[in-house]
Amino acid sequence: MRLQARISPTSKTEAILRRFSRVAATISILVGLLVLVAWKLAIVLVVTAGSDRKGMARSTAVALILSGASLLALYDASHKRWIRRLGTGAAVLTIMIGAATLLRLVRVLAPYLDENYFFIFMPTPTGSTFSSVRMSPNTAVCLILIGLSLVFMNVQVHRWRPSQWCALFSAVISLAACTGYAYDLRALYGIAGYTNMAVHTAATLLILSLGLLFARPRTGMMVVFSQEGPVGTLVRRLFPAAIAAPLVAGWLRLKGQQAGWYGTGAGAVIDVTLDVIFLLLFLYLAMASRAVAERRFHGLLDSAPEPMVIVNAVGEIVAVNAQTQKLFGYSRAELLGKPVEILSPERSREKHVVNRIRYSTAPLTRPMGTGLELYGRRKDGSEFPVEISLAPMRSDEGMLISSTIRDITERKRAEQTLRESEERFRVALKSAPISVFNQDRELRYTWINSPVMSWDEQGYLGRTDAEIVGGEEGARLTAIKRGVLQKGVGTRVETVVTFQGQPHYFDLTVEPLRNARGEVVGITCAAVDITPIKQGSAERERLILELQEALAQVKMLKGLLPICANCKKIRNERGEWNPVEKYIRDHADVDFTHGICPECAHSLYPEFYRK
């Protein structure tokens, strides 16, 4: 057993039914107040409703006020707790009033409520002709049932609502009393030896009982009555007629018989004939409504943009739309009544049967074969990849399963093309000294491909430059990227990042990243590592400087050199006299090889060089 909270109406039908509950409660209160005032002012017409068969007792009027107020208080579970408690208290008082009357009938209680307790607060005027009006037993039973229905308003036991059953029994008793007044049969509105149920009492109790039935239209027995669709519409149309038609037929037969137009036998025949006519009319309306509903259903099914197949609990196809015929190449007649496995490849049919049976034991709206490659089979035997969504459906024939089928051949091709493109892109980036990455509007890294510094392996996703780099370098990077986010215009700068103690120089390009609506949702960046270029440039500058220094030293030999006129020694900057070879070797990056010139050769070796 569980308590049910208030559920807001989700359809026009539910809203109308719940509104009727409020109106019924209001009518009950107004009728009770009007009768009490009539008792006070001795207005016989109001107390008896123009009938000579007794009127409404004061205790009944008070009970109607209490039950109407209780329904208004308990109708909406979102009311404050003290209001709902007052409503429950009013329902309990209604039960007590009805129970006290029944206990008096079995002589457990001696006084009548109207003769003692209510007489104190509302005495009967002198000379009144209805001073002996008391509550009838059937009225007391109705009040007890109504009070119990109010107490159990939000209680549900499994799928049963005690409140609705109590209200239903009360509606049957009060409807019988109203029918008795229409047919002039006292046995339907009174019990021999006891007070009769007044006509306006019966009508008010019937309205109030219906209001209790409609208070929770989405639960219990009222689900069928309040549901949208052809079944609910048919029930709502035929239910009032199914009650009124036999009553009208019986009333017509009775009046004709009382007028002497025909005897009892002929009246019975007329009654049966009218019942058969009404029954055939109801069957025709039901069949017509079903035919209209089926045409509407198939129209909606054919208007669906995707192929749809509906199967029953044993896997037989009961409905398909035009898109299914177009996709698989079958006609509607070729598919109806066939097992749904006809649309799947032969290699997977046995497994599909097992999975279908397993799904029927716990049907849920979900995709079929999550994580698996599913294929459909056309009439010509060709296969194609599909994506299938399943949804259970309740119908008069039992459980139905609706399948929405999507041909994903083009999507598969696009995914394959995208995978190949991404693989080429990945290989190209892997062999290139380029770091590519995306950042969101908070400048947190969302994707990194960095073969240079392996940032994608350092757990930097979700972090910012200020958290990773820090210091002035991080602040400079943040300022550059923040400017692109604010202006929506890309930029290209040269920057340096210190990673693991080593400076890395990058040619950084930053572009805004936009969504389908053109809004800037982040940035995409490409950073080319120019550290080797920077290092080569620095090495080149060093070599040039050393060469310049060497050339500066060589220029010293172009100045005035102190040389001995006799031995040809040269004096260095320290005042030492060195041979020419040693001096030049020390002051220039040169060395000497020894040979002999032609003139010295003639002078030294005249025997070898004769003229």
Image: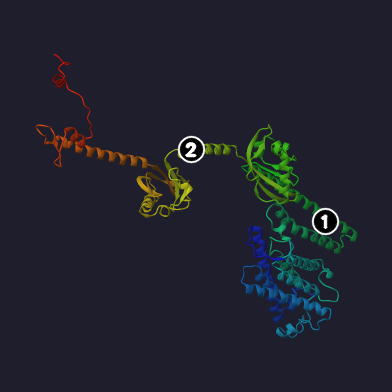
Compared to 161, does 136 lie above or below?
below
Compared to 145, does 315 lie above or below?
above
- In the rendered image, which quarter is residue 201 located in? bottom right
Q: Amino acid at mark 2?
A: Val
* Image location (x, y in percent) of residue 49: 74, 73
Q: Amino acid at mark 1?
A: Asp
Front residue of 110/426: it is 426
> Is 90 on the left or on the right of 607, as rendered?
right
Front residue of 595/380: it is 595
Task: Point out the residue furthest to the top here.
Answer: 611
- Numbered circle sitting on residue 308: none
Q: What crowding class fits label 1: few (fewer than 14 Cα within 10 Å), some (14-19), or many (20 or more)?
A: some
- Numbered circle sitting on residue 275: 1
Helix or strand or loop: what does disc 2 sit on?
helix
Helix or strand or loop: what does disc 1 sit on?
helix
> Is 121 on the left or on the right of 275, as rendered?
left
Front residue of 519/467: it is 467
* Image location (x, y in percent) of residue 332: 71, 38
- Numbered circle sitting on residue 427: 2
